[in-house]
Amino acid sequence: MKRSEINRNIEYARRVWAEHGWHLPPFASYAPGDWAGREEEKRQLAARMLGWDLTDFGSGDFYHTGLLLFTLRNGRLDGTDEQPYAEKLMLVRENQVTPCHFHWSKMEDIINRGGGVLCVELHESEPDESLSQRDVRVMIDGSFHTYPAGTVVRIHPGSSITMHRGLYHAFWGEAGQGDVVVGEVSKVNDDTRDNRFLLPTGRFPAIEEDEAPIALLCSEY
């Protein structure tokens, strides 16, 4: 991805989240030069991979296959503290797909915090990690529901869906409904080792430096 595209999307996310009443911690506004003298803070954030995160999943087409996130809190990935949870804020565009994947370790709640409708496609996985044709039993807003494999459920503002381990899911914003402000509350999040994508997928983007960054990504500390 080009750095200019990353910069534009960070600025856009800041505006959209602020319009919905979501405000970010101070380090979200640090430009690269603002990190001077903050080495310990940077070290702590890097250990938890907090902050900006934007990916096109190796597609080369962020607006069709991509996701922008901000990790607000997370336990240390090396397990050397007692924080067992994580929280993220995401911006999901209309028809912008996060590809089908599951997590070996993490359980998570995906929450529609406002805006449009979040579409989530669901499949159980088999022991060999292929897609299962079994029905999916999943919790939505605290109650269990059972759906045929491949069902797309629609999560409206205020509602949430719980992803158990091994549950394949893909999601996108429903066409014509606007951007979706999405929250995630989960166990400790490790995007370097705990994502099983159905198809080979890149997680962190290669960046073409066509202009100066306005903020560092969590993979760049």
Image: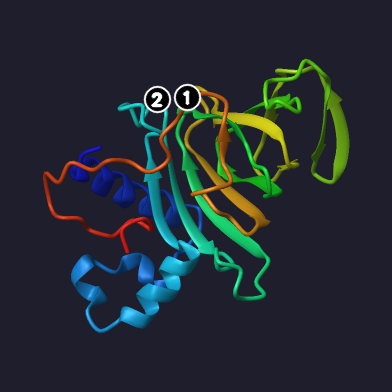
Q: Residues within 10 Å of mark 1 (few under 14, many from 20)?
A: many
Query: Residue at image x 27%, y 41%?
Result: 206
* Left or right of 140, for residue 180: left
Above or below, 12 against 201 in this view is below
Q: Quick one: 61 or 89, which is closer to the camera? A: 61
Q: Quick one: 139 or 20, which is closer to the camera? A: 139
Residue type of the residue flagged with mark 1:
Asn
Contact (CB < 8 A) between labels 1 and 2?
yes
- Counting residues from the N terminus, which is met first, the one under dot 1 or under dot 2? 2
- Image quadrant where one finds the C terminus: bottom left
Q: In which quadrant of the rendered view does residue 37 lie?
A: bottom left
Above or below, 151 against 55 in this view is above
Query: Residue at image x 55%, y 53%?
Result: 190
Query: Residue at image x 61%, y 61%?
Result: 86
The numbered disc on residue 133 is none
Disc 1 from disc 2: Cα separation: 6 Å
Secondary structure under the numbered disc 1 in the rendered image: loop
* Left or right of 201, for residue 83: right
Between circles 1 and 2, the one closer to the viewer is 2
On the image, the x and y values in percent for residue 42 come to 36, 74
On the image, the x and y values in percent for residue 24 come to 44, 65
Q: Residues within 10 Å of mark 2 (few under 14, many from 20)?
A: some
The numbered disc on residue 95 is 1
Residue type of the residue flagged with mark 2:
His
Count of numbered badges drawn on the protein: 2
* Left or right of 126, for residue 185: left
- Image quadrant where one finds the N terminus: top left
The numbered disc on residue 64 is 2
